[in-house]
Amino acid sequence: MFLAHTLIRTLYYFINSRVVVADMERIRHFFWLCSGVHIPMLKKCEVESSKYAGIGATIFFTGIFAALAASYALYTVFDNVWIAALSGLIWGLMIFNLDRYIVSSMRKDRNSWREFRTALPRIVLAVLISIVIARPLEMKIFDKEIQSELIIMEQQTYTAQENEIKIRFQADQQKLRDEIATLKNEIELKTVKRDELDRIAQEEADGTGGTRKRNAGPIYKIKKADADRVNLELQELIKTNDFLIQQKQETLSRIDSAIAGGVGSLSRQKLDGPASRMEALSRVTAKSDAIWWAHWFIVLLFIAVETAPVFVKLISGQGPYDQLLRTEEHGFEAKRIEDMAILNADIKKRTETLPKTETAFVTDRLDVRLNES
């Protein structure tokens, strides 16, 4: 009984291990496809299978990150999950295919400097792709800080719109206030003059000023008449200026009502688009050193991930797969040259019957074209 139980367990683990191995083989085959290698050729050099599986995995997960980042960014635009998911998937597939092409099109050479010059445009492109991928993910990572900054931006936008309305009427308001102040100042000056003449007349009457004779009739009457005349002028001025001041204050009230109506018609625009979020992220990054460092760590991380396949190809030596690939490509090139040489020889043979000048012309042109190729 014990032996039977042990045999069943052994068989169970054996079957499961074969399933796991088969699954791992399928996953490795999938990552080979992602790396862009020629799989039948790679199977001839098993020692490099893990390297290209790792390169393919990096390319695959970069495409996943690109799809997630694009989906989130587009969701903030369309506010529709299905549109964002479909568009993000298309973007992720495009980035995946672009990365796959970048890595698969690189060829190993014995000249390191020539390899680097060949890879430099691909590195620059990879850096640009990583920055594009990182930005939407940053907006998601710092979403709480961005939301707080968006509220501040909304308030600033509302205040700016309110100030624009007030500025439109500011010149008219200031002009009216200046005119009212001038009218009031005229009344004050006239009042001061009336009070001064009253004081002079009173001093003349009680002998404390002027001729210093108490009850000096004729002189007092003259001074009192001046004071009364100015007082009449003051009353008339008050009547006229108060009417003008009232008119101007009514105009000011209408302007204030117009400003209040314009401000009341303003709506607090909710800032939630990608441009607003990017602006909020830039402001938050500028305010906080911690977020500034986190921003650069995220960008550098994506640059490292995106450029990793290119640098792996650069720093790795020329392996068996590269040599097989070079041999295969050389075979195609040699066959092309051979086919051209056979075709040229056939044409030369057919043109032997032509006159000597035409035969020489055809031969020379064919030889030039063969040398150019």
Image: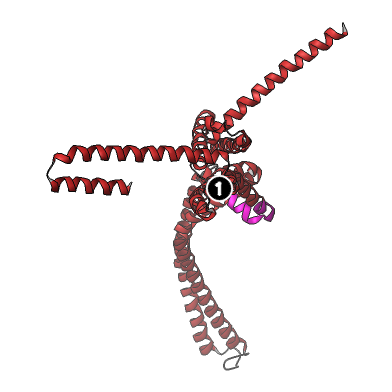
**Residue 282: within the magenta?**
yes
Describe the colour scheme in one phrase: secondary structure
Up-down relation of residue 286 to residue 150 (above or below): below
Span of residues in magenta: 276-293
Q: Residue at x 49, y 82 (%)?
A: 226
Q: Residue at x 59, y 37 (%)?
A: 52
- Residue at x 63%, y 47% (from the top left corner): 301
Residue 114 can be seen in this image: yes
**Dot 1, how many residues are within 10 Å of its Cα: few (below 14), some (14-19), or many (20+)?**
some
Name the residue located 60 percent from the left edge and 42 percent from the top edge.
137
As drawn, the residue found furthest toward the right would be: 2
Residue behind mark 1:
278
Residue 244 placement (x, y as % from top left): 44, 64
Query: Would residue 80 be visible to someone looking at this image?
Result: no
Residue 31: give x, y in percent of width and height: 58, 32
Amino acid carrying mark 1 in the image: Met
Helix, strand, or loop for circle 1? Answer: helix
Q: Residue furthest top?
A: 1
Q: Is residue 159 above or below residue 61?
A: below
- Return the residue nearer the eye: 346 or 225: 346
Near-viewer residue (282 or 186):
282
| Viewport quadrant of the N terminus | top right
Taking the image as shown, residue 116 lies to the left or right of residue 141, namely: left
x and y percent of residue 143 in the render?
A: 63, 42
Quick check: is 16 in the magenta stretch?
Answer: no
| Magenta stretch, overall SS | helix
How many numbered callouts? 1
Q: Residue 315: x and y, percent?
A: 60, 49
